[in-house]
């Protein structure tokens, strides 16, 4: 919803002014800092841009928090030790290789 509002404040209509300009004028706020010449800072576009940035930051933070919650849930279900051992086995195949070598030496001895 906020994304739609911010895009309405930023975008231009077919008449050459933004929807935010008409919203600001209806509220009694000039859409430009120098309203006489329609110049200066375009307040409706600044407001729309700020809303868009806030929505983007909120979405990114929400995604990161969701990612961390999934990792925490994974640790609760599997246990940290199991996860660490699985990662160590995938990263360092040497312990598995040593174990296979011991098995091969037992087969040759018998």
Image (cartoon, helix red, strand yellow):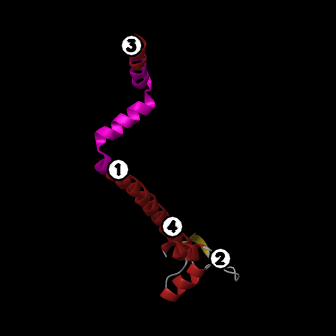
Judge the density around disc 1: few (<14), some (14-19), many (≥20) Cα neighbours within 10 Å: few
Magenta-drawn segment: 75-102
Tell me what residue is drawn at x 39 percent, y 57 percent. Answer: 66
Q: Position of residue 47 (x, y in %)?
A: 50, 71
**Is label 1 in a helix, a strand or a loop?**
helix
Inter-mark Cα distance, 2 to 3: 85 Å
Quarter of the image containing the C terminus?
top left
- Inspect the magenta stretch and tell me whether residue 3 lies in it: no
Q: Which residue is mark 1?
A: 74
Q: Which mark is residue 110?
A: 3
Q: Observer-nearest residue: 48 or 60?
A: 60
Q: Which residue is mark 4?
A: 52
Residue depth check, mark 1 versus mark 3: number of the one nearer the observer: 3
Q: Which mark is residue 12?
A: 2
> Which numbered disc flags the more N-terminal residue, 4 or 3?
4
> Which numbered disc flags the more N-terminal residue, 1 or 3?
1
């Amino acid at each position: 919803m906020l994304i739609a509002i911010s895009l309405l404040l930023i975008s231009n209509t077919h008449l050459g002014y933004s929807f935010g300009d008409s919203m600001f004028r209806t509220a009694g706020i000039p859409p430009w800092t120098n309203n006489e010449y329609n110049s200066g800072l375009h307040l409706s576009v600044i407001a729309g841009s700020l809303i868009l940035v806030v929505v983007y930051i909120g979405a990114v933070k929400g995604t990161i928090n969701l990612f961390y919650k999934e990792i925490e849930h994974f640790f609760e279900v599997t246990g940290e030790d199991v996860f660490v051992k699985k990662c160590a086995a995938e990263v360092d195949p040497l312990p598995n290789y040593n174990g296979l070598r011991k098995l091969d030496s037992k087969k040759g001895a018998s």
